[in-house]
Structures are given as C-alpha cells and as structure tokens.
C-alpha cells in the first residue's frame, strides 16, 4: 500500500473538517502520514512525536506527526527549514517510505518536499489562504510555484475553482461534503456521553436558540451577531467554536449571547439538535470571498432551518434551501420566519434540504479523489528509501 504524505497548516485535533474527513477515508487505500506544522519547544531536543487517529465512524487510522522545534517562527516558515528538514527525513526513513504521493494543504510546505520524488504532487486548495489574517508574506509566491508543479489541484468550492482553474491544467472543484448520518437526528443516542455533555452546556439556556458552530475569526461578522442578540433579547444566540486570530475582548457580550468555546465533533449533532435555527453570520470581505462553509450541509443534515449572509458559494450551491439575508434587518426577519414555521412547513423544507444533502457525501468525495489520483499518479517504480535522498529547501 503506498504512503500519502500530507503537510497541513491545520492540526488534526483542531476543528474536524475537510482534511480529517478526506484523509480518514483515503486511509483505506493509503498509509496516511499527516504532518503538522511545528510546535515551539525549547525544553528538549528537536523531535517528531506521532500518534494514531481513528475516524469517529471507525476505519483505518491516520498517523499524525507533530514536529517540536526550538524555532519561534510560526508554521512552515523558512526559519524552520534547517531544523525541520532532517526531522521529516528521519521520520520518513524510519517508516521505509518508498512508494508515495505528496498532498499539501498549504503552499508554505513546498520547500519540505522539493527533494522528494512522489508519484504525484497534490494541492488541496480549500481556501484562499493569502486573504486570511496573518497570512505569511511568501504565501502568494509559493502558491504560484505550487500551481505550476502540482499534478492535481483541488478547490474547496466553485468560487475558488473559478479563480484557480486557469493556473494548472488539472484543477478540479471538490466542494464541501457531509457525513449526513453523523448529524441525522434519527441517529442520536439520548443516553450517550455526548448527549449529556451537550445538555450540560445548554441546560441553562432558554429557547428559542439560534446557533453557530465553527471557527470564530476575522471571517465572522461580530457586529451582526451583536445586532441579532440586541434586537431580540428573547432569543438565545449560541456560538460554539474556538476563537482564533482575534482577541476574545472583541467578542460582543450580551445576556442572551453565549460563547461555548471549541467543541468535539461527536458533540456537535447534539448541540445542533437543541437549536431552533442555525446561523452563518459571515462577514463579506476578502477573507470570505472564496469560502465554501462545510457547516452548511451539516446544518441541513441536522434538519434545521439555516440563515446566512450572502456568501457566494452558499448562494450558488444552497440558495434554494438556505435563507440568505443582505443586511442585519433581513437576517433578523429570516430568523423570525424560520422560528414561525409550522410543523408541516418544517417537514416540507426538511425534505428539500435532505435532497440536497443526499447529493453530497465525504465518502463519494473521497472515491472521486481516488479516481483522480489514479489518473495522475505516475507508475510505481523502484525508489530509494527517503533516507537515500537528502531533502533540500527550494
């Protein structure tokens, strides 16, 4: 079985999203080594620690490799390379990696693979990372180089695909998908630990509840969140997710606005099941121009009405089943309409939503990726172990 070497700016233990969904499924066909960005540690020698991560639904594990270095520079920064290159080389040599493909989630890792000879080089461009807050200065240049050399480029949604498709002859759109059974209300277990955990968190929060789960960063329209809570003090707005790249002091505070912090993926369906409306209060700025939120389908699979700002891919892909508002007043009106739905109206809307959900799954996405990989991968041939080819920076 060939190896799949994955270099990611997102940690496996962070919010469970596209990398985890795809890699946990590709692990059925590849030995997946998921290599994270380095962690600063000046208390001991530079090293790589590893652990096995099994997907929530069972299946082949992914081996997660975490480098620890004394270098303060964040991510796959150039300053990390003298320390990181030999660590990665040693880790691959110890595993006798000979037949392998390379998969990058960030162009910043490109120098780490310049000395490798993979059967294919894949770039999974899930976001326009250069538009995000605190993006590395070299990211645009490095992505340009990666687009020229990659054998396969995947884009996280139609908007991003339109922006990238002319940059490489093999650029494909692979939008967000969903593990629908995971979020299905019919699959929830009232006596589970996850059910109890979700109940404890929300026991003191009245109804109706309007909820969001996901990363809370510069892409979030915090003024809109505050406006919703302020306009309807009888509503409870629940925000579940880690706060990153912004200060917690920037979060609006209201008696009916609840910040729950990061939650485990198995708990999310139970939180969602106790919400009356699901929210996607994204700002409209450069950082959200190309996003294709995974949570859209997860909300719909949970059989809840969804209200969103007019994110391009949300409108294009899900406009028929998601309420889209242009401003705060419209957002609040759509929430009111969703809360006023009769049981029959909810049933009909749910049928439409589930038809959309049924057309998308991470299993199908992973199967498509395997077909694309088979098309672009060069034939296996005798290769020296990685230890025999010194990794070098580009």
Image: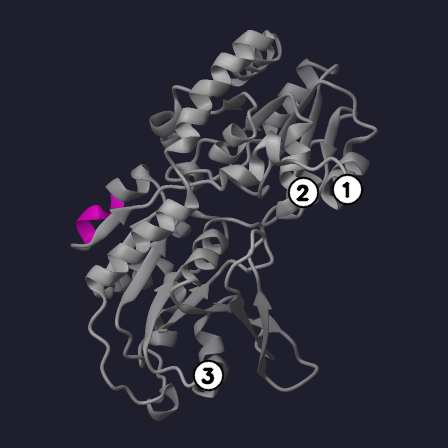
The answer to whether the residues at label 3 and label 2 have Cβ atoms under 8 Å apart is no
Judged by its main secondary structure, the magenta piece is helix
Quarter holding the C terminus is: bottom left
Q: Is residue 227 magenta?
A: no
In the image, farthest residue toward the bottom: 388
SS of the residue at dot 2?
helix
Asked if 51 appears above or below 136 in the picture, the reply is below
CB within 8 Å, label 1 to label 3: no
Residue 193 rendering spot, x and y as whole percentages: 76, 45
Name the image quarter holding residue 285.
top left
Mark 2 vs mark 1, CA separation in Å: 7 Å
Q: Residue 369 vs residue 12: left or right?
A: left
Residue sitting at 39 percent across and 19 percent down?
320
Q: Are marks 2 and 1 in contact (CB under 8 Å)?
A: yes
Secondary element at image label 3? loop
Q: Is residue 21 shown left or right of residue 164? A: right
Viewer-proximal residue, 319 or 99?
99
Magenta residues, start to end = 163-167
Depicted 191 relative to depicted 338: above or below: below
Residue to which mark 3 is pinned:
95
Could you give the CA–CA distance between mark 1 and mark 3, rounded to whole angstroms? 39 Å
Residue at 38 percent across and 63 percent down: it is 104
């Amino acid at each position: 079985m060939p190896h799949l070497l994955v270099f990611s700016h997102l940690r496996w233990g962070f919010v469970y999203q596209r990398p985890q969904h795809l890699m946990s499924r590709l692990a059925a066909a590849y030995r997946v080594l998921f290599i994270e960005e380095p962690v600063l540690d000046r208390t001991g020698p530079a090293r790589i620690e590893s652990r096995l991560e099994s997907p929530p639904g069972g299946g082949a594990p992914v081996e997660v490799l975490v480098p620890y270095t004394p270098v303060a520079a964040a991510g796959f920064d150039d300053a990390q390379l003298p320390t990181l290159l030999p660590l990665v080389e040693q880790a691959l040599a110890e595993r006798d990696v000979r037949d392998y493909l390379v998969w990058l989630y960030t162009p910043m890792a490109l120098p780490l693979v310049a000395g490798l000879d993979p059967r294919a080089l894949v770039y999974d461009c899930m976001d326009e990372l250069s538009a995000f807050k605190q993006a590395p200065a070299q990211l645009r240049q490095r992505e340009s180089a990666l687009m020229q050399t990659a054998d396969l480029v995947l884009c996280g949604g139609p908007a991003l695909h339109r922006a990238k498709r002319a940059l490489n002859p093999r650029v494909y759109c692979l939008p967000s998908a969903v593990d629908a059974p995971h979020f299905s209300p019919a699959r929830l277990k009232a006596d589970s630990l996850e059910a109890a955990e979700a109940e404890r968190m929300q026991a003191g929060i009245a109804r109706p509840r309007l909820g969001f789960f996901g990363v809370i960063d510069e892409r979030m329209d915090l003024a809109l969140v505050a406006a919703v809570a302020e306009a309807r003090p009888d509503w409870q707005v629940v925000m579940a997710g880690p706060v990153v790249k912004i200060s917690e002091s920037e979060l609006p505070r209201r008696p009916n606005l609840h910040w729950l912090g990061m939650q485990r993926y198995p708990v999310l369906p139970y939180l969602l099941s106790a919400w009356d409306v699901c929210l996607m209060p994204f700002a409209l700025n450069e950082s959200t121009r190309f996003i294709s939120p995974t949570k859209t389908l997860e909300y719909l699979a949970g059989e809840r009405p969804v209200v969103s700002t007019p994110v391009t891919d949300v409108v294009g892909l899900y406009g028929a089943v998601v309420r889209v508002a242009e401003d705060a007043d419209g957002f609040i009106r759509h929430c009111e309409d969703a809360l006023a739905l009769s049981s029959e109206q909810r049933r009909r809307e749910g049928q439409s939503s589930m038809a959309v959900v049924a057309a998308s799954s991470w299993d199908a996405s992973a199967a498509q990726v395997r077909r694309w990989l088979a098309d672009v991968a060069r034939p296996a041939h005798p290769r020296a172990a990685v230890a025999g080819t010194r990794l070098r920076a580009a």
